[in-house]
Amino acid sequence: MKFSAKLKSYRRKKSLLFALAVFSLSPSPYTLAPVFAAFEDLGVGARVPGMGNAFVAIADDASSVYYNPAGLAFVERPKVMASHSMLYSGLDDGSNLGLTNLVIAAPIWGGRLGTAGFLWSQFSLSGVYTESALQASYGFRLPKNTPFEKFAAGASVKYLTHSFSRLDESYNAMDGIYATGEGDPVLMGKNSKSAIDIDAGLVYNLTKRYTIGAAVMNIRQADVGFASADPVPMKMRLGGSYKSLWMIMTAEARMQKGPAGKLDKDFIFAAEKVFPSLDRGDVGIRASLGAGDRDFRQVTAGLSYKINKIQFDYGFSIPLGTVRGTVGNHRLALAYHFGSLTSDEQHAAQLLGEYKQLRESPDYSGLRNTMNLNDPRLKDVKALVNQEKYYAANRTLMDKANDLLPNASVINLVKRMGLVAAFYPSIPKDAAQRTPGEQMLSAGIQHFLRGYDAKAVRLLAFSQGESPRDTALSNFLDKVEETSRIKADRVPPGFNRGYVEYKLQESDALYAAKKYDDALIKLQEILEFDPGNILVLKKTGSCNYLLGNYAQARKNWETAVKKETDPAEKEKLTKMVSEAGKKAPGQGAWEPEGMETGNLRGGEALAAPAAAAEKPATGSGNAREIEKLYRTGADYYTKGDYGKAADNFRKILTLDPENSQAKKALERIIRLSR
């Protein structure tokens, strides 16, 4: 009789070993049929158990050490995970079944030589019974440009040990019904056993999103019996998965030889969904349903929260109909990711940044679903809008609306046109005689009607700052904010010196606090409306200089020199230009889109074309430095520290002005900051 069945024969009502019998997953905890109680498939961590342990085709994190070592090939940076599980909580005999794991995955030479993984696992039953496993794994991708380039393979070697404590029954054996008063030959014998076993796995990438995975566990079927042969059963897994950036779906089949010698088959269907955020962390939910032989039925669920390089996971599972009197399995895990962002994480961050910019600052009409005034059917309406006769334009649009409906974009344009006409039926004053505030009001209305909401709100905020006592303008801006769902950066009540002076005041305060990157953003907001402001150009050059962007500082000061009329000040600026030139001998004049802007009057473009730059030769030393700067900048970016991230990307452009990755990253940060 095997050890697990021998233990169960005592039938002690409150015995801790009853829990072990339950844990063997036999349909009836009182059966005397042979069962496999040693080294059951308990899983690792909390994320994957929350998906019903269906991971053979996903295999994208450190848990691959246990589920499919081939998946280690796709781990791009070192990871450490620790977890603890409370299994079958609430059993009426007070049993305490716990599982503790520690997993490490480390790419070798950036993953070019594959990835190594290590796992330590220990299961314990209230100090009565203990299992531990020490596992070393390796996964690698097969060579490119071969018929096997879509494959990854991996293998594990594990050292298994289990032991039990001698209880009172060890000295008073039972013949099945009565105590004999003699020592039990099994329980008095060797109380620990160790063995070595092997796992192996494969992953095949059908496409970028679809993957097939297979793994075989316990290939050697190591003998872990205490008194007689008791091999660990071989287990096979086969699955397929669909994976997008923030969603995973998978199906998996598992097979192993059951206690009665029949092949047991289980099937799991699982899904995971991540709700990402650029600066508040990612929240993930997951769940699975499982069914199979020997009345196997299981429901699992899980949650996770990931911020920067730290991830917290919780997993819950409960068997249905087999083990009663339990409140399920509860698992907690903490993972830490070393190194810089992976390519997928960088792509995700970029998409989130772009989505946030589009959501908060949409600069095209399609997002707001407003009918384009360039539509030939709106020719008469467009002509009246260009003449700033908004009441007449609204009447004409209403006459045409019946022929254009049903169309949501027409309804939106009608609402916008009606709003403008209610506040400004027409703007008759000649454009040349308008004040800066009136010019910005005119341009803001034009942008609003065309669906360029971010520009419209900025222009109207400038106009309102120039005329803080204009109640109609303030109310109009309120309605535009409500329609566009964009909050204007207004001049506060009581400040009567205008938008430019307010932004200068904000910039000076940030400059005094040595927050040069934030001060620079405020100055650039002024240049959107007044690109020839000499004082702002000087201050902008100073901020760029202090941030190490010497080429841009030189350009700012050169522009200021051309406009300066004071000879003494002009001489001083010339010296500053020369000093910046010395510190940037190889820098081109590249600037990210949006750094310098044209005058926004009349709907002109926000960004002026960037100047061309010659690319200097970069040696291997520069390449290593650029890689380091980019990694550091990306880390700051994921933490939401855009100022420090921008500093690193600007330093890259000092070494390599044509570096496209740094340009895109810096452009993204500037858009987000605005």
Image (spheres, rainbow, N blue to C red):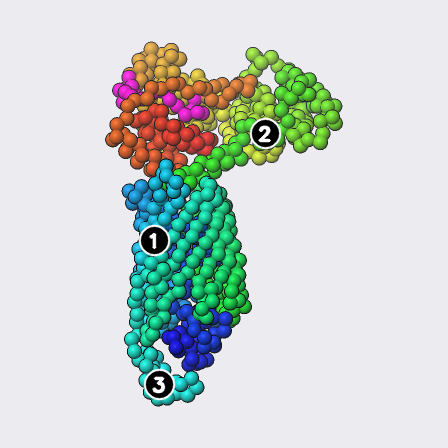
- Near mark 3 (Cα within 10 A), the count class, few <14, some 14-19 or many ≥20, is some
- Near mark 1 (Cα within 10 A), the count class, few <14, some 14-19 or many ≥20, is many
- Magenta residues, start to end: 578-596
Image disc number at residue 395 = none
In this rendering, which labeled residue sits more in front, label 1 or label 2? Answer: 1
Helix, strand or loop status at disc 1: strand
Task: Return the residue at label 2.
Answer: 366
Q: Marks 1/2: CA distance?
A: 52 Å
Task: Return the residue at label 3.
Answer: 172
The residue at 62%/28% (across/down) is: 370
Q: Is residue 406 left or right of residue 84?
A: right
Is residue 586 one of those drawn in magenta?
A: yes
| Residue 156 visible | yes
The residue at 45%/48% (across/down) is: 212
Going from the N terminus, do you reach mark 1 or mark 3 first?
Answer: 1
- Near mark 2 (Cα within 10 A), the count class, few <14, some 14-19 or many ≥20, is some
The residue at 48%/50% (across/down) is: 240
Q: Position of residue 101 (x, y in %)?
A: 36, 59
The answer to which image quadrant residue 41 occupies is: bottom left
Helix, strand or loop status at disc 3: loop
- Vertically, is 127 above or below 534? below
Going from the N terminus, do you reach mark 2 or mark 3 first?
Answer: 3
Q: Marks 1/3: CA distance?
A: 45 Å
- Mark 2 and mark 3 in contact? Answer it, CB < 8 Å: no
Q: Amino acid at mark 3?
A: Asn
Image disc number at residue 155 = 1
In this rendering, which labeled residue sits more in front, label 2 or label 3? Answer: 3
Q: Amino acid at mark 1?
A: Ala
Going from the N terminus, do you reach mark 1 or mark 2 first?
Answer: 1
The residue at 55%/20% (across/down) is: 603
Q: Position of residue 33 (x, y in %)?
A: 45, 75
